[in-house]
Image (cartoon, rainbow, N blue to C red):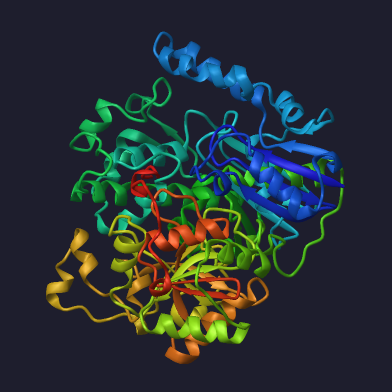
Amino acid sequence: MKILGVSAFYHDSAAALVVDGEIVAAAQEERFTRIKHDSEWPEHAIKAVLKIGGIKADDIDLMAFYDKPFPKFQRLLEAFLNEAPMGYRLFLHSMPAWMKYKLMVPKVFERELGWKGGIVFPEHHESHAGAAFFPSPFEEAAILTMDGVGEWTTTSFGVGRGNSVEILNEIRYPHSLGLLYSAFTAYCGFRVNSGEYKLMGLAPYGRPIYADAIREHLIDIRDDGSFRLNPDYFTYIVGLRMTGKKFDQLFGGPMRTAESPIEQRHMDVARSIQVVTEDVMMKAVRHVHKVTGMKNLCLAGGVALNCVANGHILREGPFENIWIQPAAGDAGGALGAALIAWHMHQGKPRTVGARDSQRGSYLGPEFSNDEIRAFLEGRGIPYEYLEREELIEKTARVMVDGKVVGWFQGRLEFGPRALGARSIIGDARNREMQRTMNLKIKYRESFRPFAPSVLADKVSDWFDMSAESPYMLLVGHVKDEHMLALSDEEKGRFGLDLLNTPRSSVPAITHVDGSARVQTVHRDDNPLYYDLIQRFGEITGVPVIVNTSFNVRGEPIVCTPEHAFTCFMRTHMDHLVMGNFFLSKTDQAPLDEDFDWRNHFSPD
């Protein structure tokens, strides 16, 4: 049976194809349209997953949509009626989309795909739960989902066993940990549903001096991890902004304007909300463990992308094992809905393997050497063709020499992280690498850290963790023996001055607090990437490299050879490796463009 799962109309639209219970393909619409977090019907993503599966829309047996439109519309109506006449502008702003397609999902399936058959509509958090549990390597597990809001639910927990998931309890809108974090994201000048990871990256530069104020005024946290927000400080219920004047007064000034200088106050606010978020998540996890008695935990929902909090959960227990859906946000809902349709609506059994069934999250399109060669020769682009071992050797050597490499190999990743298929990579030992990559290649804020890719069998040599982190969703700390001693002057630095202080022998991936957002690379998932890191490690003694997403600021991760080449040419990357083709910037003619591409992508 072929099942197509779809998520759409809010943010991160996506499609997933499940055939006889196997995850065959999944992709986000933004990778094709080049619109970050694209919320439109995922036309291109659907075409891509059907092509990967070798089928047409007519071959699909069942469709699944990741939430229930009518309960969600009911929530919108009730929120408006409860607050009227406040919220009238928000209501008017929302109505056209609801009338045109959000309430007409079956009609949209019919119009776009000619589909007149049945559609499975799991609840939003049920889709998250399905995406978290069904691909996991656990026969049974507790499940915790946290995000902004679905129909009504913002947080839920339950149990997954065999081929089913059961939601046991929930927290409802407007009380939402995801919306609370997004409110602070907006307050610090970053884009909601996009810049939350920036807030997380900014936190280590600050002090948690506002944490008590947040607990006293904004959120009432109970011992079981449940919570209630104080609506007096938030305006997202009735307006297009997240917070109002009362919020500004509590934190000593107005919200930061995008692109304006970041002050110490913003760093302190970021650190404070991060501390509170981790407090809520830890209490929730302990409660879920107490109620379910499980040893395994699965996480999903946008809050589950908070890899710093995830690292705390891993280190502090009480669960023995955790697994996090790599597409934890709404994109993963497409996959969860399709898997729920297979296991729970069709009653099909689930087989659990030694490792998860997400296939490294390499679920998108790939391009053969023939296709890449046709692109290069069609554009008259100079290249070298190298056999596999030559390619690995040459790429490792140029990285040792301090060069930055665009790495385009195999199937595109599903989820927000680049995992060695569409990555920009470099030498983690290089003290200038973070600054070079941030300012000359990614064109993004200097404070943002880079993540390491490390061989899975070497992770405990370099970081204080032994668990696998294949999807870059766990933060660990660089081990003490690799950290550098600080002078008294360096110890006295704070804020962005910390950027000038190398913290370890792998400074390019070590954040100012000694942490790192680790990706462990297993050879079964990505043999070419594993072999490249291994060769780099043989040359340098350090099996750790920098891995950041192959894009510039505000741009979705590249999908095609053309996207990759364009990004390579617009930046100061030194080399581009696509399939077996090795490109050097010094061989290339300047890119012929008649516009300033830096204004093309909106900052996030």
Residue sticking out furthest to the left: 489
Q: Visible in this render: residue 102? A: yes
List x then y, in percent, for residue 286. 53, 53
Q: How many marks?
A: 0
The residue drawn where x is 41% and y is 48% is: 554
Query: Which of 364 and 12 lies nearest the eye of the viewer?
Result: 364
Residue 437 occupies quadrant:
bottom left
Query: Which of 474 and 401 lies nearest the eye of the viewer?
Result: 401
The residue drawn where x is 58% and y is 47% is: 32
Query: Which of 365 and 473 lies nearest the eye of the viewer?
Result: 365
Q: Horizontal placement of 97 versus 494: left or right?
A: right
List x then y, in percent, for residue 304. 52, 51
Q: Visible in this render: residue 512? A: no
The residue drawn where x is 57% and y is 50% is: 328
List x then y, in percent, for residue 344. 81, 43
Q: Is residue 483 above or below residue 242?
A: below
Q: Horizontal placement of 539 versus 342: left or right?
A: left
The residue drawn where x is 54% and y is 72% is: 520
Residue sticking out furthest to the top: 85
List x then y, in percent, for residue 261. 20, 47
Q: Is residue 600 above or below residue 246?
A: below
Residue 326 occupies quadrant:
bottom right
Q: Is residue 225 above or below residue 297?
A: above
- Where, quadrant-wise, is the C terminus in this rendering? top left
Q: Horizontal placement of 383 versus 54: left or right?
A: left
